[in-house]
Amino acid sequence: MIRFEQVSKRYPRGQEALSNLSFHVTPGEMVFLTGHSGAGKSTLLKLIALLERPTRGRVIVNGQNTKRLNRRRIPRFRRNIGIVFQNHKLLNDRSVYENVALPLIIDGIGRKETGRRVRAALDQVGLLGKENRVPMELSIGQQQRVGIARAVVSKPALLIADEPTGNLDPDLSVEVMRLFARFNDVGVTVVIASHDLSLVHQLGRRVLTLEEGRLAQPENTDGP
Amino acid sequence: MARKPDRKREQKRPFAQRLRIWTSRHVQNCVGALGRLWRQPFSNGMTIIVIGIALALPAALHLMVKNGSALGGRWESVVDISVYLKQGVSEQDAMRIADSILQKQEVTEVELIPADQALENFRRASGFGAALDALSDNPLPHAIVVRPDPEYASPEAVIDLGTALQEIPEADIVQQDTEWVERFHAILDVVRRGVLVAAVLLALAVLIIVGNTIRLDIENRREEIEVTKLVGATDGFIRRPFLYSGFWYGLSGALVAVLLVLASLWLLAGPVGRLAGFYGSDFELEGLGPRAYAVLLVGGAFLGWFGSWVAAARHLRRIEPT
């Protein structure tokens, strides 16, 4: 599903965020990405979503070599990836329904089908009935779940999340992580960056640890 | 597992469905952009009024030229062409020739001045009455005064008409005051060119006003643009609402311009009528006419659309999610 081959990323300001990184995530896998802040977790996720391009090496996502995707083809590529952010990136001037429906509207899905899928996604994150609320009216945990609903509403094969529990208390964090695990159970490949080691180990999935842009244990295969 | 991404998904959709998606998107964006305009009536109203003034200026100049040439049309009898027939052509023949000239589409009016009448006129005007009485024959020929249609009153057309008249076998001398006509049209051409230059400059001003407004609009919606890009929106999808905003700015500005022109005409009609009255003229101000109004509206809408297109092309590309 995701294959990094000797990938390095150097930012224009000079520091090398990732160096010579290789790993493989198979379809249907759920992988945690840990490491100190600045270890390159966010950079790695950005390379997957084509928010950044690698300086060297190959990044293959969903069978596509991202190097061959020019600017015009990035939008379609991104529609196959659900992205969840720490600060959820919801639009505060739109209702929960409109926020979740956004990827479907962009994809040109009809009104009826959109309504059905948005409600299904909200149901999955336990927010059915909040469609007409504005994100600001919801709790932080609920806002994060709206962000997750938006990420899964178009049924992407791959879900990536950057510190999705960064702003949540431990109980909510567990709840959100369980949510991701449920999507993984139905076949979605999930990659989550998190610095919360105890939480990560609690879930018992494969862990990739980044240290200064390199994998700490390159041969790490399955979780503990 | 993974659905094959990319083009294939798009191609799977039948044409009718894609057309439906396309149409509903445009309708939504079109209406949505109008709604956004209404929600900030004050600041958008200012922009629209500025666009309206910029569009009204060339329209007003055009009106001046139009009314100027209409006024000028009243002296256009000087472009009359006089055809003097050969001696010995009978009056019946002269009448027949006058009729055939009137058949030409370039001609609005002909007046036959028979030789006898010409002599009479000359006798009265010159004061050579006694000398003329000494002549046994009338030395003057029949003359036909031809008035070209205003649409064919350009110097070239008048010269062409003169050449055509010269080819009538019975015609002797064809006289036309083309030099005066040329000068008159040269002046009008200069003024017209001036209006054109002003129109181009003011159109540029409209482009800049709309472009700048859209640029600010894009800045204000930066977050929204970033998020939509993140969830896979194409450039076209993001650009479309801004293009419709520009379209509405331009069209509303053009409507304001039309209102300004109508108001000015209404304000000027009274005084102009009174002024004309002093000169014993029934001259009335002419309006722009349906075609010019259509040009103003379509042109305004196009300028708005194009201005926002330029702004969107420049600024949307710079906003990338991070």
Image: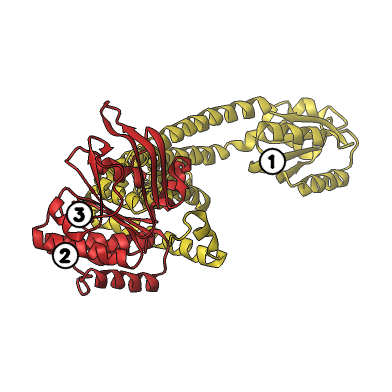
**Residue A19 image offset from top left, x and y in percent:** 31, 33
Q: Are marks 3 and 2 on the same chain?
A: yes
Assign a secondary structure to mark 1.
strand
Q: Are marks 1 and 2 on the same chain?
A: no
Mark 3 vs mark 2, CA separation in Å: 11 Å
**Circles 3, 2 touching at the beta carbon (< 8 Å):** no
Which color is chain A depicted in? red
Residue ID for mark 3 = A164
The residue marked by circle 2 belongs to what chain? A
Residue at horizontal 20 percent and vertical 57 percent from the top:
A92
- Residue B14 figure quarter: bottom right
Q: Quadrant of the N terminus of chain B?
A: bottom left
**Residue B31 image offset from top left, x and y in percent:** 36, 61
Residue ID for mark 2 = A175
Q: Amino acid at mark 2?
A: Glu
Residue ID for mark 1 = B148
- Residue A53 figure quarter: top left
